[in-house]
Image (spheres, rainbow, N blue to C red):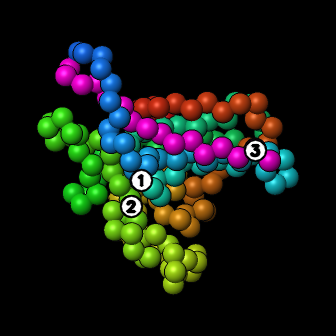
Amino acid sequence: MAVAHLLLQLSAGVNGASRNRMLIPAILSILQLIHLAAPGSGGQDFYDVSLVDGFNVPVRVAPSGGGGDCRPAACAGDVNAMCPADLRVVASSGSGGVVACKSACSAYGSARYCCTGQYGTPATCRPTNYSQVFKSACPSAYSYAYDDTSSTFTCSGASSYDVTFCPGTGS
């Protein structure tokens, strides 16, 4: 089984029209993930969009071909626009614009938010106010570690997967 974990890094133009590029910000804790395991159990591919480590840009993952319930996994909403103040990562250019939203685990490192230690099971790790912000913006994306029932997608026999960045809210 091949497994892919794609990290989405955000880069932005500096000084308006200049095409200089910089990484904003250059820390892994706020990069959002796409997981893909193909082929998995019973010949099915498993895929998802995860906000467990944070959010930076809207993304959509859609299988091409295949059979079964081959629906897209997406986070097309702008989580940055509704990010709680204590999780915001702002542009270093001085504009103050929110360029990413950290997860509560990344921000605080506590067992409760990271689903570790005494909170390391589906029974003890429950959604928090922070993960519910992510879930309300992106209902089909993972918002915390045990968000499997609404956030894991499967497809049998997909020939490829299309990853679209900034797909728009209709996706």
Expressed as whole percent of the image width and height from the top left, the position of residue 112 reads 42, 76
Mark 2, Cα crowd under 10 Å, few <14 / some 14-19 / many 20+, is: some
Q: Is disc 1 placed on a helix, strand or loop?
A: helix
* Count of all numbered marks drawn on residues in the image: 3
Q: Nearer the viewer, residue 76 or 93?
A: 93
In the rendered image, residue 20, in percent from the top left (x then y), is placed at 30, 20
| Vertical side of 135 occupied by 35: above or below | above
The percent position of residue 94, horizontal first and vertical second, equals: 14, 37
Left or right for 40, reference 102: right
- Residue under label 1, please give it: 29
Q: Residue furthest left?
A: 94
Mark toward the start of the polypeptide (3 vs 2)? 3
Give the extent of the magenta segment: 1-16
Q: Are marks 2 and 1 in contact (CB under 8 Å)?
A: yes
Any part of residue 44 in sight: no
- Label 3 to label 2, Cα distance in Å? 28 Å
**Residue 2 numbered mark, or none:** 3
Ranked by sequence position, the earlier of labels 2 and 1 is: 1
Q: Which mark is residue 106?
A: 2
Q: Residues within 10 Å of mark 1 (few under 14, many from 20)?
A: some
